[in-house]
Image (cartoon, rainbow, N blue to C red):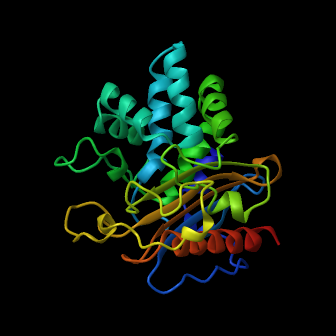
Amino acid sequence: MPAVVAALATPAHAAAAVKPPSVPAGTTAAWVVFDRQAGKIVATRNAHRKYRSASVVKILIAIDYLEGRKSVPAADAGLLKVMLRSSDDDAATAFWERLGKGQIVVRQARKLGLSDTTPPPASKPGFWGYTSLSAYDIVRTYRYLLDRAEPRVRDTILGHLRRSTPCGTDGFDQTFGIPDGVARPWAVKQGWSGFGSTPPVRCGGDARAVGAPISWIARRATGSGVPDYGRPVLHTTGLAGQGERYVMAVLTAHPAGGTWNSSVKRVTTLTRDLYRGVTR
């Protein structure tokens, strides 16, 4: 077993000296931080707990697309760029439909050895954001890109994530978590779901509107077979530190009926405290 895989195989390798950040009441959180220099996990909580992926699954979509062809047409290159940098949903849906929907997840979970990653329920095949995954599997995915993927695949995906835009194309501000909590350099892929289709404040808009209630969509009853269905989720994942030393995944589910602003603050505080803990 390669050293990197062996180090990832046991979350118990996390450094005992790292004081975990406090998780607010009503928030469910999971994280894994892998130190590439030390070659081991240095912080972990609920490493294998499944969350619905939201836009984090776009990394797997991009890997599947790029590894399935030798060249990329200009139009598809544009879709990859906006999907990865600005989390564009239409671009993700175009690839999802073209590449076989849930079979993308099946293929990548098998190839990358992702033990907690499964496609959306059969009743919701078009909902790529209902893919289930864990912090452990996300870190493993980044490790695959860094250490095993072909250079053209690695450079394309991570190159876009290093240029993540402050605003998603849907108008949501995607600077929560790593971007706001960790100094550059970093590369990030964010995820959010359950806040409706319209942000309480369009990114770059009137800050006085921040704090508007989350859409009713986030408060629907559970029971769909999708992790945390009915609760809004916010995920921040990526590479941080000089030389991209740390691979981080912080996944969270928040109380239904809260606000985007309060949820974002919780994630950013958790991420900042977690990073400070492992870098002391």
Residue placed at 33% from the left, 25% from the top? 98
Residue 145 in percent (x, y) is at 60, 37
Q: Is residue 27 visible?
A: yes
Residue situated in front as seen by the camera: 146 or 250:
250
Residue 112 in percent (x, y) is at 47, 40
Q: Quadrant of residue 57?
A: top left
Quadrant housing the N terminus: top right
In the displayed image of the protein, which residue is found farthest to the left?
123
Q: Is residue 96 above or below residue 257?
A: above
Q: Is residue 48 visible?
A: no
Q: Is residue 25 above or below residue 162?
A: below
Quadrant housing the C terminus: bottom right
**Mark count:** 0
Q: Is residue 143 above or below residue 72?
A: below
Residue placed at 36% from the left, 66% from the top? 215
Residue 142 in percent (x, y) is at 59, 45
Residue placed at 22% from the left, 51% from the top? 121
Using residue 54 as the reference point, say whether residue 246 is left or right of it. Answer: right
Residue 222 in percent (x, y) is at 23, 70
Q: Quadrant of residue 10?
A: bottom right
Residue placed at 40% from the left, 67% from the top? 232
